[in-house]
Image (spheres, rainbow, N blue to C red):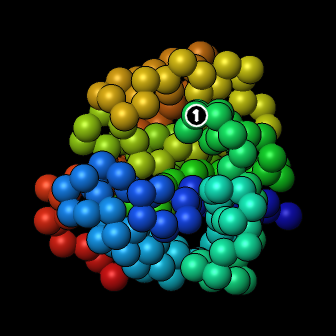
Amino acid sequence: MRIKPTLIVMLKEPRPGRVKTRLGRDIGMGAAAWWFRHQTARLLRRLDDPRWQLILAVAPDRDGLQSRVWPAHLPRLPQGGGDLGARMARVFRSLPPGPACIIGGDIPGVTPAHVARAFAALGGHDAAFGPAPDGGYWLIGLRHPGRAPAGFLTGVRWSTEHAMADSIATLPGHRIARVDTLADVDTAADLAPATPD
């Protein structure tokens, strides 16, 4: 029997001043939280697909698990503490066997076809990355999440042009696939491109 892959979306409660703060400095914290809430609602509707199990990794832990912002039928797990790398590594290690990908909630252009291509790439690779134009990435996937090496995603320079290269360096000896390049939204300038729905 084929194991169903898992897609995890990392989400923060959309509260002003706690989410998308770089965007908030440009358009106001309330407007940034409003954008993120509506962006994630569209994203989750679009990516709720029978080809994979969709799970939300939420923060802050207690508020996120109880939040009414996101669809009630989607399973949730807490992100826990630490930097982004520590939280993603923890989420990966908590999953059942089978390929898994993690994305953020702030990628307006992502479609089910992008996710399907990432899972297809994991058929012949140990890990997959969806690059972002700024040197980061919008997707990271592992063929065997439970086997991630001990130093996985430690020492990564997050929010810099080195984020993807640093992350790949924590997977020595792994066969790495690169899939579609997509942009996330960090500042007001990133809001201009059209988004699919």
Q: For the residue carrying disc 1, how many other residues have a C-alpha within 10 Å: few (<14), some (14-19), or many (20+)?
A: few
Relative to 101, residue 30 above or below: below
- Label 1 sits on a secondary structure element that is loop
What residue sits 77% from the left and 31% below the top?
147
Image quadrant where residue 74 sits: bottom right
In this view of the protein, which residue sits in the foreground, 4 or 170? Answer: 170
Is residue 134 among what the camera can see?
yes
In this view of the protein, which residue sits in the foreground, 89 or 139? Answer: 89
72 lies left or right of 162: right
Image quadrant where residue 151 sits: top right
What residue sits 55% from the left and 59% below the top?
12
103 lies left or right of 130: right
Which quadrant of the figure contains the N terminus? bottom right
Q: Position of residue 135 (x, y in %)?
A: 30, 33
Q: Position of residue 121 (x, y in %)?
A: 52, 47
Which quadrant of the figure contains the C terminus? bottom left
Amino acid tagged 1: Asp
Is residue 111 among what the camera can see?
no
Relative to 70, residue 142 above or below: above
What residue sits 47% from the left and 79% below the top?
41
Q: Position of residue 178 (x, y in %)?
A: 41, 39
In this view of the protein, which residue sits in the foreground, 160 or 63? Answer: 63
Q: Name the residue carrying label 1.
A: 83
14 lies left or right of 85: left
